[in-house]
Each structure stands twice: as C-alpha cells, then as structure tokens.
Amino acid sequence: MIVVTGGAGFIGSVAVHELNRRGHSDIVVVDRLGTAEKWKNLVGLAYDDYLDKEDFIEKLVSNHFGNGIDLILHLGACSATTEHNADYLMENNYRYSLRIAQWRNEHKATRLVYASSAATYGDGRKGYSDDEAELDALRPLNMYGYSKHLFDLQARRRGWLSSIVGLKYFNVFGPNENHKGDMRSVINKAYPRVREHGVMSLFKSYRGDYRNGEQQRDFIYVKDAVAMTLYCAEHAQVNGIYNIGTGNARSWNDVAHALFKAAGREPKITYIDMPETIRDKYQYFTQANMDKLRSTGCDSTCSRLEDAIEDYVKTYLSKNALIAQC
C-alpha cells in the first residue's frame, strides 16, 4: 500500500498519476478537499481509497494499518507563503508531520518521503546546500518556511534522517495547480492574459544589482520533480534531505519570453510595483545545489525551461486540461 498525503493537491496528484502509469493503484489518497475544486485533480486517477487528513492520522496512530503501508509520500501541507496564522502552520505543517514520522519510527519497514521546501533557505545568503549539517544557519523569511524548517531540524535531532527522506522543492510549476489560487505559478496565472491580450506583468526589482524581471529562480517542471521524488522513494540507500530543482537559475524575463512563444504571441512585458508586504521577504535568487542527489546515482534529466513551458501550455493550459486527461 502507498499513502499519498496531499494526494489531491498539485505535486501529490501528479505523483499519483505517475504511480498509476508505473502500474500502482493500491494507493490511499489523503487530503482535505474543502470547498475549492481540488477534487478535480482526482478525476481519472486510480486509487483504492480516499481519507480526510484527520481520519487518516487517527487511523495511523491507532495502528489501524498495522504493517500494511509500504510507502508514505507525505506531500500534504499548507504551502501558502502568505499565510499569517502561525498556530495553524505549526499544527498543519509541523505537528502533523511529526505524528507521521513518530509512527514511522515504530514501523521501520515503511518508507517515508516528506516534502520540505526551498523556502527554508530564506534570502539565500547561506547558499542552497542541502547538507544537513548546515540546517542551523538557515533563516526562513516567512512562517511557511519556518514550519518546514522546524520539522527538518526535529528530524535531524531525533536521528530520523538516517532512514527517511526530506525533499526541498524549489519553484515547481505545471498541470494540476489550478486550485492553488494566488499560490499558482506565474505561468498559470499569466497565461489567459497572454493568450487574450498579449501582455504579461512582472514585479519591479528593488535592488540595484537586479534589473526589472531579472530576478532569478530555479524553476522545475512538476513532472521532473515527481520523477526525482519517486527515485528517492524507490532507492533505500537514499536518506536525508535533498534539493529538488534543476540546478539552473532562470530569470522571470526568461519565463515570460518562453510563455509568449508557447502561446504564439509577441512579447510585451509590463513591470509593476511589488506589494510592500512582501518586499522584505522576496527571494531575488534561488538555485538548487543538486550535487548531493546526483551523487546517489539519480540521473533524472530536467526539461529546459522553454520546453517545459511549451508542454504545459500546449498540452494542458490551452486545453484547460488536467494531467489525468492527457
């Protein structure tokens, strides 16, 4: 049995789709659907059962599953970098993860892979190395990043990282993110305006060493992120914390030009003011150090940004399609 928490979410639903493609359907999807349309991500996927996240954790800690779980992909969390309810983030992202990891510590035959985040790196002044010895130096810029960082620290302190995997996802984009609202990728949010009006807006830079639109991020296509995730799940010798990115930083202007090309429109970019509420928490540069994951033998090749955006636009966005529909 494979459990995927956040299985109706962005990365989670794509992971379930890929597991299906590899012949797995003995899957329990764990999530909280609420009133949004996240449920649409589940249509067309093959899985054995769905459980609300609170029902699952109660069943888990009461040993309802016994030794029947082979793998837990713990991808569920509140990923909103703008969420201000610190108590909610501590309970939902930190303590929920803690309960799963504590159970797994008593059931060592179960493989556990959990989602951390590149948000733990803060402004990047300490670099983007996934060496666990350097965790103490990191200073996240928002409460979401801190909730993820706190669990990384706890997992190291308790010695769990010798047998479980934490993945620091960088800027993931691709199909099945429609439900994420303001947390959708800029590609997803900008596509309708680019298609209809041929215009795209990017934030101005407020640092002299970056021109407008030249702020850089490590953008990774969700299909590539899932391939790396399942590689880690399938290889028992891979334990500890690993970055999930391309290892190449690209600018927002690069993203815009690739999106215009994929949509068949001439580039027209406007630069707008960045909200003051996020100016001091904005990451101007992120780039995953991928040496550690590569050293395990992972040879997953990431799509070029331009190729990934073209696939996203032509296969999904232009058809208003989800991954299970294509």
Image (cartoon, rainbow, N blue to C red):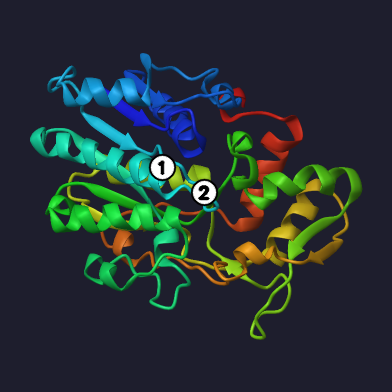
- Crowding near the residue tagged with mark 1, few <14, some 14–19, many ≥20 C-alpha atoms within 10 Å: some
Which element type, helix, strand or loop, lies under badge 2? loop
- Percent position (x, y) of residue 272? 79, 65
User: Toward the viewer: 9 or 173?
Assistant: 9
Task: Report whether residue 299 is seen.
Answer: no
Q: Residue extending furthest bottom?
A: 208
Q: At 33% from the left edge and 58% from the top edge, which residue is drawn?
A: 149
With respect to residue 247, does 49 lie above or below? above
Q: Position of residue 18 (x, y in %)?
A: 44, 31
In the displayed structure, would residue 198 be above or below residue 3?
below
Residue 103 appears at what percent x and percent y? 16, 34
Residue 196 visible at all: yes
Q: Residue at x 76, y 45 (%)?
A: 191
Q: Residue at x 64, y 45 (%)?
A: 182
Q: Position of residue 40 (x, y in %)?
A: 58, 22
Left or right relative to 97: residue 124: right
Q: How many marks?
A: 2
Amino acid on which disc 1 is placed:
Tyr
Numbered disc 1: secondary structure: helix
Q: Amino acid at mark 2?
A: Glu
Mark 2 Cα shell of 10 Å, populated few (<14), some (14-19), many (≥20): few
Disc sitting over residue 300 in the figure: none
Q: In the picture provided, is 289 more to the left or to the right than 64?
A: right
Discs 1, 2 touching: Cβ within 8 Å: yes
**In the rendered image, which quarter contains the C terminus?**
top right
Badge number at residue 83:
2
Instruction: State the CA–CA distance, disc 1 to disc 2.
Output: 9 Å
Instruction: Name the residue beneath numbered marker 1.
Output: 88
